C-alpha cells in the first residue's frame, strides 16, 4: 500500500499539547478530510493519534513520537523507547531524527538503527534530515526513505531555506541519493508541491498549511496589518 504515495500528497495531521486542535479524535477527522481531498498518505504524531486515524482511513501512515530529552536536540522518535511504543500502532513507516543533532544518552544514530533493525527487521524507516550530508549518511545506514523534514530547523541547517535556488538541495538529493526522497518542510503551496514532484521526489508531505488553522489564520491577519498595505 505504501507504493500508493508515489507522486502523491501525504498530509501531516499533528497537533501538540499546547495547540488548539490537540485531540486524537480531531486528528482522525483531519485525516478523513485529507483523504476526501485526495491525499494518499498521512503523517501523525503519537500512538493514540495513529490508532484513531487508522480506524477511520485506510491510507498508509508515517508514524512519529515527538519527545524532548534533557541535553539532546533530537526530538523526533529519538530512541528505541519511542519506536517500541509506535509498534503498538503499526505505522507503515516510522520516521526518526537522522540529523547530526545531539541524541539522548549519547547514543549514535548508527546504534539506534542497528537496534531497530534487529528488533523489527521488516519495519520501514524514514530519515528526517536537515542537510545533504545527513541524507547521504542515512542512505548508508539503510533507511528506506529520506526526508527533508528538518531543513532549516537544526543548528547545522540554520538559515537554510528549502526553496532556495529552485529547491537546489532537493535537486542534489535526487541526483546523489538512491533512496526515495520525501520532500517535507515549508512546502506550503500547491505550486511548491508540484515543483518538487517535477524535480523527482517520491512524494511530498504538507502539514501546517493544511492542518494548523491557527497558523493559516495568522497569515491572513498578518497580511491585513502588513506595512505594505
Image: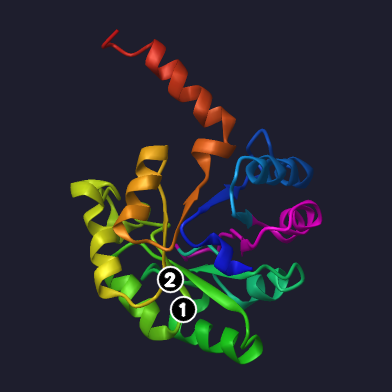
Residue in the picture at 49% in, 37% down:
209
- The quarter of the picture where residue 62 lies is bottom right
Residue 87 placement (x, y as % from top left) = 71, 74
Residue in the picture at 26% in, 11% down:
228
Q: Which residue is mark 2?
A: 98
Which circle, 2 or 1, is nearer the viewer? 1
Instruction: Report how many numbered discs are placed on residues in the image.
Output: 2
Foreground residue, 217 or 165? 165
* Quadrant location, the C terminus: top left
- Residue 211 located within the stretch drawn in magenta: no
Residue in the picture at 79% in, 53% down:
52
Residue 224 placement (x, y as % from top left) = 40, 11
Can residue 77 be seen at all in this image of the molecule? no
In this view, 176 is above or below 219:
below
Can residue 5 be seen at all in this image of the molecule? yes
Q: How is colour applied across the structure in the image? A: rainbow
Foreground residue, 56 or 102? 56
Q: Which residue is mark 1?
A: 143
Apparent side of residue 194 relative to residue 47 in the rendered image (left or right): left
Residue in the picture at 38% in, 46% down:
194
Q: Which residues are magenta?
A: 45-73
Q: Which mark is residue 195?
A: none
Residue 182 placement (x, y as % from top left) = 43, 61
Identify the secondary structure beneath mark 2. Answer: loop
- Residue 53 located within the stretch drawn in magenta: yes
For the residues labelled 2 and 1, say whether their Cβ atoms are less than 8 Å apart.
Answer: yes
Residue 137 placement (x, y as % from top left) = 34, 79
Amino acid at each position: 500500500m505504501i507504493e500508493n504515495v508515489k507522486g502523491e500528497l501525504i498530509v501531516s495531521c499533528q497537533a501538540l499539547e499546547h495547540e488548539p486542535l490537540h485531540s486524537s479524535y480531531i486528528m482522525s477527522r483531519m485525516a478523513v478530510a485529507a483523504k476526501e481531498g485526495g491525499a494518499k498518505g498521512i503523517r501523525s504524531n503519537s500512538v493514540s493519534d495513529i490508532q484513531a486515524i487508522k480506524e477511520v482511513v485506510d491510507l498508509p501512515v508515517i508514524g512519529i513520537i515527538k519527545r524532548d530529552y534533557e541535553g539532546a536536540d533530537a526530538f523526533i522518535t529519538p530512541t528505541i523507547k519511542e519506536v517500541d511504543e509506535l509498534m503498538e500502532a503499526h505505522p507503515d513507516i516510522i520516521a526518526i531524527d537522522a540529523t547530526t543533532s545531539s541524541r539522548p544518552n549519547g547514543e549514535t544514530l548508527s546504534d539506534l538503527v542497528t537496534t531497530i533493525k534487529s528488533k523489527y527487521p521488516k519495519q520501514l524507516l524514514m530519515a528526517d534530515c536537515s542537510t545533504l550530508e545527513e541524507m547521504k549518511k542515512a542512505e548508508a545506514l539503510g533507511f528506506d526513505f529520506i526526508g527533508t523534514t528538518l531543513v532549516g530547523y537544526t543548528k547545522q541547517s540554520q538559515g537554510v531555506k528549502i526553496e532556495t535556488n529552485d529547491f537546489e538541495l532537493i535537486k542534489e538529493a535526487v541526483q546523489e541519493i538512491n533512496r526515495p526522497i520525501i520532500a517535507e518542510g515549508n512546502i506550503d503551496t500547491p505550486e511548491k508541491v508540484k515543483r518538487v514532484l517535477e524535480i523527482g521526489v517520491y512524494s511530498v508531505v504538507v502539514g501546517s498549511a493544511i492542518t494548523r488553522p491557527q497558523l493559516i489564520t495568522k497569515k491572513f491577519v498578518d497580511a491585513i496589518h502588513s506595512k505594505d498595505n
